[in-house]
Amino acid sequence: MENQKSNSKIFRAVLTLFLLINLEANSQVIPNGSFENWTQQIIGTQTILTADNWVGSYTQGSSPLSPIQTTDHIDGSYGIEIETTQWPIVGKTGGIVACTFPITFKPLYINGYFKSLRVDTTGTGQVLIHLKNNGTLIGGGLFTTNTNVSIYTAFSQAITYTVNLIPDEVTIWLCSEGIFGVNTKNYGNKLWIDSLSLTNTPLSIDNNIDYEDFFLIFPSPSRDVLHVKLKNYKVSSLKITNVIGQNLISEKLENETNSINIGNLQSGIYFVELEIADKIFVHKIIKE
């Protein structure tokens, strides 16, 4: 029994190393995606510390500046904080920053870490990505949050494509509230972002945590029914996506052992995303 457990841990370590190597080979650095580099610039009549490679909306007058450099971060020394503030001309507006850069592969996920403060929960914080080929939009994804999240939490948002082409340009928007920062409700809605990346596999959340302390998923391969056993946590949310990030099944798990019908799925590889106790886990399964 002890040897089996040891072999299992060795297998998981090797698998993790393989996934990390594969993720590195199929990823591209987002310019200043960890928000470590900042430069003083003159915006209007003010000198403002701006995030390199990110074009932002900045308020004037006595209102708070948005976005700002923050030492509240998940890695490095800094992150970015975006806030809904007052613009003299248009009134309330969500803070927004954008980064556009060339790309040489077809990412399936945008990953990162976020925190959220929602003074008004009808205003959503957002990470929006558009991908183009020769100037034509061919793919995109949108991560949203409308709840208070007080600690940095990982997200892995799937990207979907309308045509089978390789993009050559990417634009990423970070908004504290509303679609492109409009239709806002209250001052003070905030979004913190750090450690952004693009990959073709979903982010595996917190590799230092042994997932078996939280859940078991079996069997895999599976034909008709997938069983999810939660350990010590009775409520969880579950999503099953395919390899291109399409959400196929969404359920709320309220029992210790839960049975998920996957009989309608075609044979192939899928990803199970579980949110448990403020952590997100992504687990690969095989459908026979």
Image (cartoon, rainbow, N blue to C red):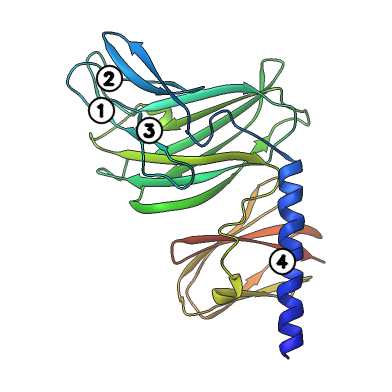
Which mark sits nearer the N-terminus, 2 or 1?
A: 2
Asked if residue 221 is positioned above or below residue 110 in the image, the reply reads below
For this orientation, the residue located farthest to the left is: 62
Between tags 1 and 3, which lies in front? Answer: 1
Mark 3 sits on what residue?
A: 178
Classify the position of the C terminus by image quarter.
bottom right
Query: Tag 3 or tag 4, which sits nearer the N-term?
Result: 4
**Residue situated in front as seen by the camera: 15 or 141:** 15
Amino acid carrying label 1: it is Thr
Element class at badge 3: loop
Amino acid under label 3? Gly
Q: Is residue 171 visible?
A: yes
**What residue sits 27% from the left and 20% below the top?**
59
The residue labelled by disc 1 is 85
Name the residue nearer the viewer: 93 or 183. Answer: 93
- Label 1 sits on a secondary structure element that is strand
Whole-percent x and y of residue 88? Answer: 22, 15
> Disc 1 and disc 3: Cα gap in Å?
13 Å
Q: Earlier in the sequence, mark 2 or mark 3?
A: 2
Label 2 – label 1 distance at C-alpha? 7 Å
Residue 145 x/y as whole percent = 41, 46
Q: Earlier in the sequence, mark 1 or mark 4?
A: 4
> What separation in Å lies between label 4 and label 3 (alpha carbons)?
41 Å
- Asked whether the residues under the numbered discs 1 and 4 touch, taking CB atoms below 8 Å apart as contact, a structural biologist would say no
One can see residue 123 in this view: no
Residue matched to label 4: 13
Distance, label 1 to label 4, CA atoms, is 46 Å
Q: Residues within 10 Å of mark 3 (few under 14, many from 20)?
A: many
In this image, 89 relative to 199: left or right?
A: left
The residue drawn where x is 60% and y is 75% is 212
Give the percent coordinates (x, y) of residue 215: 58, 74
Q: Earlier in the sequence, mark 1 or mark 3?
A: 1
